[in-house]
Amino acid sequence: MRSQHFEHLFSPLQVGGHQLRNRVALPATLTNYARASRVTERWQNFLIARAHGGTALIVTEVIAVDPQAVAHQAIVSGFDTDNEPGLTQTAAGVHAAGSHIVGQLWHPGRQQLWQPSRSPMGVSDQPDAYSWTVPHVMSDADLDRLVDAYADTAARLHRCGFDGVELHGAHGYLITQLLSPWSNTRSGRYGGSQAGRAEFCLSIAREIRARVGDEFIVGLKMPAREGVEGGIDPKEASALTTILSESGLFHYFAYGQGNFSISLEDHVPDMHYAPGHFIDLHKQMRTAANGVPVMALGRIGDASLAERVVAEGYGDLVGTARAQVADANWANKSANGALGTIRPSVYNNFCWGEVHAGKPLEEFHNPELGAADEHNYALPATAKTRRVAVVGAGPAGLECAWKAAARGHDVTLFGDNVRAGGKLHLEAALPGHGEMSRIIEYQLARAREYGVSFHLGNRATAADVADFDAVVLATGSECRAPDMRTDGSTPSISVHDLAQRIEQSALPRGARAVLFDFDHTAPTYAAALALADAFSEVTLLTPRTHIAQGVNYCSGLGIHRRLHQAGVDIVPATVPLRIAMHNMRVRNVFSQRLQTIEDVDLFVYATPRVATDTLRAELAHDDVHLVGDCMAPRNLMMAIHEGHAVALRL
């Protein structure tokens, strides 16, 4: 595939005995689409759709090489014959679309995040840094057996038509545990020196080559920066890369940062990281790789940035996982210069959190994710055009409006603000959340493309929508005021009001602000950071035992880091009771102990929301639909997907 828009990104690349049509890769992306450790149609569809979408190299999600590696039942097993038909079909489907496929071979070692009560296997007696699970220390014979297990699984994938495998040696899993001086305190063949720590990985690659030959791709994913004291840093990673590349056993290297420890936020860098945050590390590793191709990945979702990565020598391949979760056709659209039609990923890691909570992978803009026709899905045309009023121009209303219009309906969108976007625009004004505006920009572009009429700046009444065939209410929700007494000495505002003041550059300043967190979502903590810039002291109260319980644990680590670095005083298990003379009385929910917080100049609350649905009772229509928070206050994913579902029912 050649492109006049991104010449380097869409040039071919030789990897082992295979020529890739371009430099775009789908890195391993956990989906939880497998069932009972078996390949499912949805698991296959996800990979095949990205091949149809123009991606040259498809890397599967983790495939367990041993029964001990099956951390949960959505992990595909590669150690038995049961999955051979499904794996064969997957490889054939990817090849039919013109792409290559490698399977990511995996063993978690001591890392037992999902089943900490299970007996984990480790390379030393050091506990897993996230779950604190203490493993059984494997002998050299245990590791020899696992070398065979990796090679057996690779041979099985070779028989199923796969083009190669990628050894997962990043993120603190078994191979990382052996490569890292932080976790590998062994002596003998698999420990000690850099060469000893690399030996397990080298042994696997040698055994794979012995069984399937030199044409079969063998890649390795490893950290360039582990992010823990005494672990793999860029200097150590460069030395290991040189040892591994000089062996001649590997066809490419990919680099993923962090592990399951305090550095986990580097694993899936969210919107607080700059685009391409790690590309300098990749360039350093590429220098050490002796000409072996390097895959750059981590917060790369823009084709211009991906082009720069290849053109300026940061990497030979570019992995764009979350960008392709949002849009299976990312590669083809980029190659054709159709950048405005790409569904954006905003890197807030909601999808990652859902997967690690045991749910199937979902994405804001892509409700057809994993469907058989995902790559060429089209909204079904309506049999009869209807006049549809959508009241509420936030993400739920916009999604419903543009998709109903795309189906052929005559759609009018009402919004009480002069600007569409609802409270998502306010969230985008908070520190680190600017990416959220891209959701609105995409929806607005589609609404204009399909001819939605806009009536903004006035609150719609029942009379305004009386003549429409169907009405969709997407009027959102509001924070409820906390149950506390105040003498009015201290202003009390919701987190939404605070965001509006930030957007208008009207944030007040003072000695102390108190933020009551009864919400536990990421925007609340972004608001705390904004307050820390304007007030000498910020106190964050929550009735729960700790904060950020509504945020995935990867991004949650970043929230804790930023709040602590900003000096925010976090007070758990505490609720506000009253404010008088700028002094706030608070109570511990367990001990009932009372305390006073003095000199409070601003009180901000992020509390459970109340649906704004009063217009529903005033409507005489038979065909009325509620979507998003006005149905029930939930999350952004539900709001957008509900807008999609109602658009299909109209």
Image: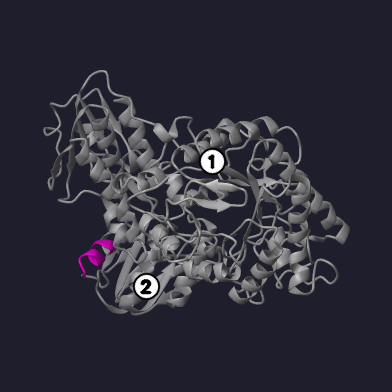
* In the image, residue 44 lies in the stretch drawn in magenta: no
Q: Which residue is drawn at 76% across and 62% down?
A: 134
**Secondary structure beneath disc 1?**
loop
Instruction: Assess disc 1: are there few (<14), some (14-19) or many (≥20) residues with their C-alpha within 10 Å of its C-alpha.
Output: some
Q: Residue at x 65, y 46 (%)?
A: 164
Q: Where is residue 472 in the image (x, y as percent from the top left)?
A: 25, 33
User: From which residue to which does the magenta span run?
Assistant: 499-505
Label 1 to label 2, Cα distance in Å? 44 Å
Q: Magenta: predominant secondary structure element?
A: helix
- Note whether 585 is above or below 376 in the view shown: below
**Secondary structure beneath disc 2?**
strand
Q: Can residue 588 be seen in this view?
A: no
- Tell which tag, 1 or 2, sits nearer the viewer: 1
Q: Which mark is residue 360?
A: 1
Left or right side of 38 for 413: left
* In the image, residue 504 lies in the stretch drawn in magenta: yes
